[in-house]
Image (cartoon, coloured by chain):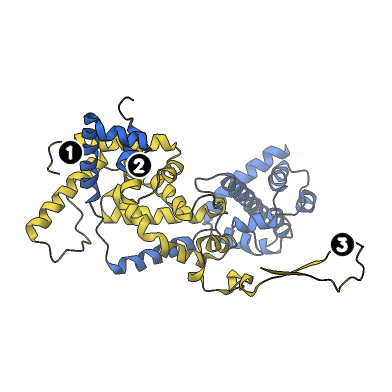
Chain colours: A blue, B yellow
Amino acid sequence: MGHLSSTELIDVMEGVAPPDARQHAARCAACQDTLARLEQVQRLVAGVEVPDPSPLFWEHFSARVRETIAGEPRSGFAAAGGGWIGWRAARYALVAALAVGLVAVALDLGSRGGGPAGTNPVAPAVASIAVPGATPQAATGSVAPEDASLDLVADLSEDMNWDQTADAGMMVRAGSVDSAIARLSASERTALAKLLEAQLGHTSS
Amino acid sequence: MASRTDQVWTGGMRPGWTVTVVQREAAEQPVDAAAPESRPLAELDDAALVALCVAGRREAFDPIVARHRRNVYQLCYRFAGNHEDASDFAQEVFLRAYRGLRSFKGQSSLSTWLYRIGVNVCLNRVSLKTPPVGPLDESHPVADRTEGQGERLLRDERAAIVRAAIAKLPRKQRATLILRMYHDLPHRDIAAILGSSVGAVKANFFHAMGNLKRLLGSEPL
């Protein structure tokens, strides 16, 4: 039998080696020397302790973890490092953004037409586009059904469902579109309206 | 287990059939048949707590943190070498664990799974930092009152040297050494954590010891 391999030496050091390996180690000076050096290092390494933190640290630590988790979706709904949920959430965000933008354009066009934006019947109809579960026909039925930009919204939202949307925090609620637009500055509204107006003009031409 | 053959109840029986009535002993009844939802969380095992977390009860994660925080922190400290980073790393370990609880299938123990996350977090985060070669962290020491100051200084100095040497080991060797020496994990579990074979883990452990011997050179043992 030749000298013990690295794994056999570890087994001998840990007392789990088979009898033949133990017998070899007992009579081989070279293997005994290697084992002695291993055991020296083992003793040295084992003597290094981790300083115990203050007893108060543990409760603070648990509280910090609790706070961090409170901002998380329910366990398992967000894959670490992205994954399908990231793509889903991005799609929902895109649909919601498109819906908000379309409403902004509708309001802007409505106000240019002389009527007050708040009375424009287009807004709630477009807002319902972002609600998962709505069919493309229902979503687009009352406003510009020939509009290609709405087809994009319909395509993106066709395989959504309520649970996934709610879990992704992307549910559109009554009034949320209005409040989102209300938070835009005047210049942001103007810029958004121009962008979407240009896009609508492009797609309808 | 008690059993008996009922010779009296023959109604509906076919000739030649024997009805065996098996009575459960009282000891076979569950001592506590209460559903996990109705028991204090601290009394539940890890598997039950994980199930509750996945079902949406965030508070079920608290006992998991309380049970495993010390081991996770110590693992992180072994890699980080200081309290602040160890605390941050440990927090990230639990956050990642919470996010991934649904993928935990119970094939290993929860602690082994947490060690796996911990090793990944530590190796990723430590590689972005300068290896800890400074003196032993003194921010939260628990002093040994019976130990003389000179002895303590010498011990701390040796510990700092050993930490610095461990920090210079290749990643898998370092992880193997830490898990084996300081967390007493079996080679099989280390292999599962590191995605290696048991033989590779033992070889890594051997080479880690050999490299440490070289790095420590003539340090008094």
Label 3 vs 1, first from the N-terminus: 3
Q: Give the residue at x 33% y 57%.
A: B87
Label 1 amino acid? Leu
Cα distance, mark 2 to mark 3?
63 Å
Please give left or right for residue B6 compared with residue A40 in the image: right
Observer-nearest residue: A173 or B187?
B187
Label 2 amino acid? Thr
Cα distance, mark 1 to mark 2?
18 Å
Label 1 lies in what chain?
A: B
Label 2, on which residue? B176
Tag of residue B34: none
Tag of residue B216: 1
Please tell me whether mark 2 sits on a helix, a strand or a loop: helix
Which of labels 2 and 3 is toward the front?
A: 3
Question: In the image, residue A111 lies at what x, y percent?
Answer: 66, 57
Q: Give the residue at x 70% y 48%.
A: A157
